[in-house]
Amino acid sequence: MTTLRKNRFSSFGGMIGRSAQMHELFELIACVAEEGESTILVQGESGTGKELIARAVHDGSPRKKGNFVPVNCAAIPDELLESELFGYVKGAFTGAQQSKIGRVQFADGGTLFLDEIGDMKPNLQAKLLRVLQEREVEQVGAVRPTKVDVRVVAATHQNLEALVAEGRFREDLYYRLAVIPLQAPPLRDRGEDIPLLIDCFIEQFSRRKSDTPTVLDPRALQSLQAYHWPGNVRELENLVQRLVILHRGKKVTLKELPEKYRCEDLQLAVPQLQEDAARVAEAAAPPEAAWGESGLDFNGLISEFEDRLILQALTRAGGNKKEAARLLNLKRTTLIEKIKKKNLPT
């Protein structure tokens, strides 16, 4: 299995992260890559690095000497996508003066990456299903199919199960694609990776310009960690490039960030919550005299401590559960489950 470098952070297949979500993803990629045959469905929001995941699967597989062929199903007009994918024979339509192999055949022996698979039209879904089931492709205008050996990695930001329920995506194709599902985590759920990504992008763009590296002061960095990042890693990369251009070799302060990235009300929230947690922990620690022969109610004390931390976070977040979850480094769904289970006031 591919060895992952784990020290200060992990770098794998062009992806960077030390968060638990990314380490889990790296391990899954390394595992499924070696198998080399099963189809993979990568799901995640726009800008989370789905193509990087697909490339990492290809590069870690027995197919790495073959072609990695990416196709953006949403970027190619519907009338051209069929011939781009499956190719055509001479005379198949007006203007087809010579035969042309499609990208499926070009990926023979390698990996075909179908990005935004949710935008593929039903007639092409049927032809793709045949590729997966029969391991053969039929060119436009051809009399007989051609055998192919290709691994398909598909990706989408859409909910394919919902599209299946709406009748917009074939159920049989969905199950063929989702043999191995991988989830690309959004950047807002892995805030601890943001400083690492910023350092990487600063180095990348500074090296291009031969500049002294730009740096962010702690308040600016914390503000970026508090931002919700709808454009994910791609948005962060674009922002860092802008900062490097505008502030070459200088320190970027909170006020110098574009307005939408300034979270001034939250800039001291995390340190304050950590101080509160320390005080709560000290207060919750039982006195030495409380230790009897039967010991303590460990689970009860831990539960009480957890209750206090959650209530502290909710207070600091003004009752906003999403912000409270960020302060506690929890997923919002996890925090909501804890609140309901503990029947805490909100």
Image (cartoon, helix red, strand yellow):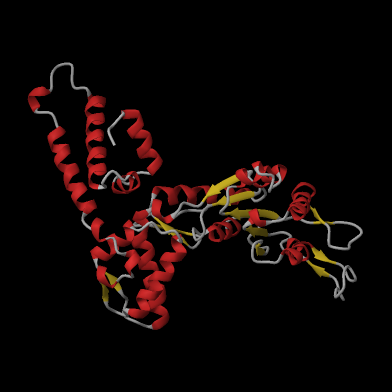
Q: Residue at x 61, y 47 (%)?
A: 160
Front residue of 118/139: it is 118
Percent x, y for residue 77? 70, 66
Residue 187: name its quadrant. bottom left
Percent x, y for residue 116? 62, 57
Q: Name, please, the residue furthest toward the bottom.
A: 210
Q: Residue at x 87, y 76 (%)?
A: 97
Give the left or right position of residue 319, taking residue 172 as reference: left
Give the left or right position of residue 82, taking residue 307 as reference: right
139 over 341 or under it: above or below: below
Q: Name, please, the residue furthest toward the left.
A: 289
Front residue of 311/302: it is 311
Percent x, y for residue 227? 35, 58
Q: Residue at x 58, y 60 (%)?
A: 55
Q: Residue at x 24, y 68 (%)?
A: 217
Give the left or right position of residue 239, taking residue 291 as reference: right
